[in-house]
């Protein structure tokens, strides 16, 4: 402890996670070469026939994923040392990030539904704390939307746990294969799919993902690359054996390609730098989920890992640019930054190219393979069309982003100070730059036991290149075109508004759900609490008592006329009564 005394928590966390990542890499090589799977189990409590156990599953998949999570999180924490240097509670921030990472690791190594819930819920809870880290109204709203959407997934996981009680164990890994056709297992499968859809933000749960951009940029880099949003994909990869023949999986395919398409279109309307990158994450999650629901879990896992590298780097570059621009995120104020911050611009462009699937960068190996398998599969034209259009849209919004940030004129201030000498941020980006270039090829050699050789006609093979070039051309044209003229030529204002606002999903998942209940509550309060209820209870009773007390107060004034009058009145009443009797 004396040795670490002089070092900051950022440096210690970085060293620990980086070394742990290296250890996982070495173990993964050993496991994949010898085809090993280690399963550890500790019995915590045994009650009648139910035993609550803590179990850990180590195979090449969990070790490889842990390696990527630890590598990215170590680099992000090192990056935070510079990015968050003006933060007074930096230690608290780093501890929250570490909790986030450990929740993800718990989820990765769990073959048990109980420990999966711990990791799953840990991610949801810590993500709420991180999204509301900058405490303002926008952050609170975004955090609440994130937490409540993820809570739906938690509820489904809890229901799966209660259903699995029928089988006597929560270790799902044991009976996935021979319980395939069981009706109960189908119900469990549907719940698992719904839980994964909330965590990985598929339609109709997409609105929280761009809202979570209220978090600090290092958190966004971590959340959108390898932790929170990939938890749902990873869960479905693990449960894939059970789900593969289900009809609900086909519905997931439709929803995920729609998510991909919707995110691609919305990103072209967006001007917030972080939101564009968030929507690109949503698009790539749609790609992972769709290829997963076609029955290729290894391809989904491959794309998940390659995507994690360049997406984390993309967010880091965005963080540097936002820092330089006095915390302004609007891309219309940026421009020509490649002249002033060349190293950051290099990283930004390479990660953008990897995202687009430019040949021989990380994204190309996974994306190209996925699209060729789609061309090869026996699917209808709608799915095929959405896949390729979404790929074109990725190039579209990326090229638009490059035009706005790199090529067009700088629009912020007359006097500006852009410098590229924050070496802590640059060093952390260099690690991910290296991985963004090589991770695709080294994973494709390592993961697949035999090379995927896909023979297609020349035009089908080149289809990805065609749609990418078309997307780049449109991106160039649109970035030079005024938004109003684009609407005039192509779309009406209402249609444009619909596409811009993620198909009204944020409105539907906030006002759409709460409006009627809030309205009902307002009417109840106005008509009952402050209306009839007031008149017939507290307020009404008070008025009656007040009027009576005013009336009686007159009698209690020691006035001779009142006493004489009341005496005569009483005598008159008594005489009348006696007469009538």
Image: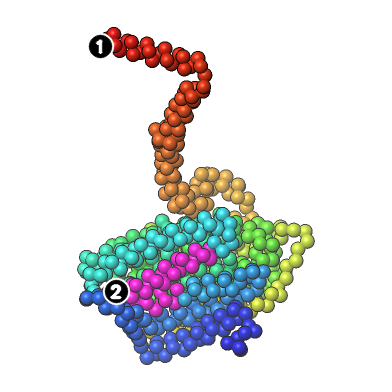
Q: Give the range drawn in magenta.
A: 103-131
Q: Which residue is the site of mark 2?
A: 170
Residue positioned 50% across, 84% down in the render: 20
Quadrant position of the N terminus in the picture? bottom right
Whether residue 317 is situated above or below residue 251 in the rendered picture: below
Whether residue 448 is situated above or below residue 480 in the rendered picture: below
Res 533 quadrant in image = top left
Asked whether 349 or 279 is in front, the reply is: 279
Q: Which residue is the site of mark 1?
A: 581
Residue 285 is covered by the magenta coloring: no
Whether residue 38 is situated above or below residue 353 in the rendered picture: below
| Secondary structure beneath label 1 | loop
> Circle 1: is it few (<14), some (14-19), or many (20+) Cα within 10 Å?
few
Residue 292 is at least partly visible in this image: yes
Residue positioned 59% across, 79% down in the render: 9
Residue positioned 28% across, 66% down in the render: 162
Res 422 quadrant in image = bottom right
């Amino acid at each position: 402890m004396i040795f670490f005394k002089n070092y900051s928590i950022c440096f210690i966390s970085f060293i620990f996670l980086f070394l742990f990542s290296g250890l996982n890499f070495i173990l993964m090589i050993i496991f994949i070469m010898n085809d090993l799977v280690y399963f550890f189990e500790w019995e915590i409590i045994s009650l009648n026939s139910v035993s609550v156990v803590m179990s850990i599953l180590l195979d090449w998949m969990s070790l490889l994923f842990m390696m990527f999570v630890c590598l990215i999180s170590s680099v992000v924490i090192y990056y935070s040392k510079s990015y968050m240097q003006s933060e007074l509670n930096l230690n608290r921030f780093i501890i929250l990030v570490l909790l986030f990472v450990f929740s993800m690791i718990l989820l990765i190594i769990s073959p048990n539904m109980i420990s999966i819930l711990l990791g799953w819920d840990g991610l949801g809870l810590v993500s709420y704390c991180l999204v509301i880290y900058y405490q303002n109204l926008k952050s609170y709203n975004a955090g609440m939307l994130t937490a409540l959407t993820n809570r739906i997934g938690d509820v489904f996981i809890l229901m799966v746990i209660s259903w699995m009680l029928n089988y006597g164990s929560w270790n799902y890994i044991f009976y996935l294969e021979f319980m395939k056709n069981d009706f109960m297992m189908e119900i469990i499968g549907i719940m698992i799919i719904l839980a994964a859809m909330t965590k990985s933000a598929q339609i109709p749960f997409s609105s929280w993902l761009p809202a979570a951009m209220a978090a600090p940029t290092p958190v966004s880099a971590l959340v959108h690359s390898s932790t929170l949003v990939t938890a749902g994909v990873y869960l479905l990869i693990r449960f894939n054996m059970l789900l593969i023949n289900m009809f609900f999986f086909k519905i997931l395919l439709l929803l995920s390609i729609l998510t991909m398409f919707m995110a691609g279109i919305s990103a072209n309307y967006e001007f917030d730098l972080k939101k564009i990158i968030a929507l690109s994450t949503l698009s790539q999650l749609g790609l992972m989920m769709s290829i997963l629901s076609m029955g290729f879990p290894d391809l989904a896992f491959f794309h998940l890992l390659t995507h994690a590298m360049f997406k984390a780097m993309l967010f880091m570059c965005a963080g540097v640019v936002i820092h330089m621009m006095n915390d302004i995120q609007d891309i219309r104020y940026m421009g020509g930054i490649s002249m002033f911050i060349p190293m950051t611009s290099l990283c930004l462009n390479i990660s953008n190219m990897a995202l687009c699937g430019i040949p021989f960068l990380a994204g190309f190996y996974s994306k190209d393979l996925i699209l060729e398998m789609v061309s090869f599969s026996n699917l209808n034209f709608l799915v095929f069309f959405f896949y390729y259009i979404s790929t074109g849209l990725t190039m579209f919004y990326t090229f638009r982003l490059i035009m706005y940030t790199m090529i067009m004129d700088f629009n912020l201030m007359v006097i500006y100070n852009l410098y590229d000498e924050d070496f802590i941020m640059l060093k952390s980006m260099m690690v991910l730059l290296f991985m963004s270039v090589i991770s695709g090829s080294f994973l494709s050699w390592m993961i697949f036991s035999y090379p995927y050789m896909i023979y297609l006609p020349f035009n089908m093979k080149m289809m990805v290149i065609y749609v990418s070039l078309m997307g780049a051309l449109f991106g160039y044209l649109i970035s030079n075109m005024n938004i109003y003229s684009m609407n005039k030529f192509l779309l009406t204002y209402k249609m444009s508004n619909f596409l811009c606002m993620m198909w009204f999903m944020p409105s539907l998942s906030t006002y759409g759900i709460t409006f009627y209940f809030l309205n009902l509550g307002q009417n109840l309060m106005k008509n009952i609490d402050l209306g009839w209820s007031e008149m017939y209870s507290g307020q009404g009773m008070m008025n009656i008592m007040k009027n009576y007390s005013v009336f009686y107060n007159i009698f209690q004034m020691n006035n001779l006329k009142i006493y004489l009058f009341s005496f005569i009145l009483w005598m008159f009443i008594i005489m009348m009564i006696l007469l009538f009797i």
